[in-house]
Amino acid sequence: MNTKGILFDIQRFSINDGPGIRTTLFFKGCSLRCKWCHNPESISPKIQLNYNPKKCILCGRCVGYVKGHGIKISNGKLKIDFNKHEQNFKLIDICPMKAYGKYGKEYKIDELLEIILKDKDYYDNSSGGVTFSGGEAINQIDFLCKLGLKLKKMGIHICLDISGYDPKNNIEKTLNFVDEYLLDYKLSEQRKFKDCIGKKFDFNKVIQILDKNNKSVILRCPIIPTVNDTEKHFKAICDISNKYNNIRYVDILPYHNMVKNYKFKHINAHTRYRVPSDEGKDRWKKILKKNGLVNGIIENERI
Ligand code: SF4
């Protein structure tokens, strides 16, 4: 049983990851490779070196430290071979400007409880709680269950963000402590799965398990122009939300590119897409209404 979990972020006072005021824990490690991922630092399950060029003054101290192997200054920029240095955390101490850091940190259960419980009054007064997000939190299933059950015993409301990709049947292990699932619905056309998210899987399997167990679901639908902003996909969203009574509402998430560029220096999977216009979003709303969407929101507004 893993007694430590690896997280890459903790957001207190979060209001977009389930009901009320919440603390969102972002777990490291994801099995998918969504081309539009805005948390690429979540993909690897390991703690990784990061580098922020905005802090770097090109003093060359790190280049000297590695004797030029895998780090060099070229055309006024620092070039780092992350295949060589992803785990070279000594660089963090070498840099006088703190340009190096880490993606990810190990936590014990008690350390997380201490952080989470600081805001218990806010959860109680806003019907909020804790959300497990990522990455894919179920990839660290032992740690997740241990923490989840402790929080459950304390009466804290728990949400779990899932992609629907669950080859090890880990979802079933979370049913006894998760109150509400934030289930992603990214694609309705199987032929796009491999190319756009890296894996093929049956989305219906997970939603059926949650439905059978009367688990409340918020269906989260990232909409990426040229990938899934099609009439066919919007109709599929409506069909699913009308079919399953356990879906509390559909959350339409328009693609955005508010991502720090340096995050992608050592992650190749990301592709930039066009940010949808207001007119484009109005078109989506019309299609959703036409196809009978009952409970839907987009950017916190009812559709
Ligand atoms: S030591 Fe720090 S500031 Fe100097 S070149 Fe390396 S990253 Fe930049």
Image (cartoon, helix red, strand yellow):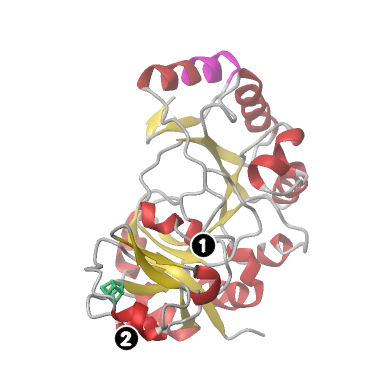
Asked whether the beta carbons under mark 2 and mark 1 sit within 8 Å of each other, the answer is no
**Distance of mark 2 from mark 1, alpha carbons?**
23 Å
What secondary structure is marked by label 2?
helix
Q: Main secondary structure of the magenta part?
A: helix
Residue linked to disc 2: 93
Residue at horizontal 53%, vertical 17%? 289
Position above or below: 79 against 197? below
Q: Which of the two discs, 2 and 1, sits closer to the camera?
A: 2
Q: From the viewer's perspective, is 229 left or right of 154?
A: right
Q: Amino acid at mark 1?
A: Ser
Residue 192 drawn at (x, y percent): 70, 35
Q: Is residue 233 left or right of residue 68?
A: right
Q: Amino acid at mark 2?
A: Asp
Tell me the residue at 50%/56% (across/down): 40
The quarter of the rendered structure image containing the C terminus is: top left
In this image, 43 relative to 126: left or right? Answer: right
Magenta stretch bounds: 285-292
The residue depicted at 63 percent of the width and 51 percent of the height is 163
Q: Which residue is mark 1?
A: 42
Q: Is residue 132 visible?
A: no
| Closer to us: 195 or 70 | 70
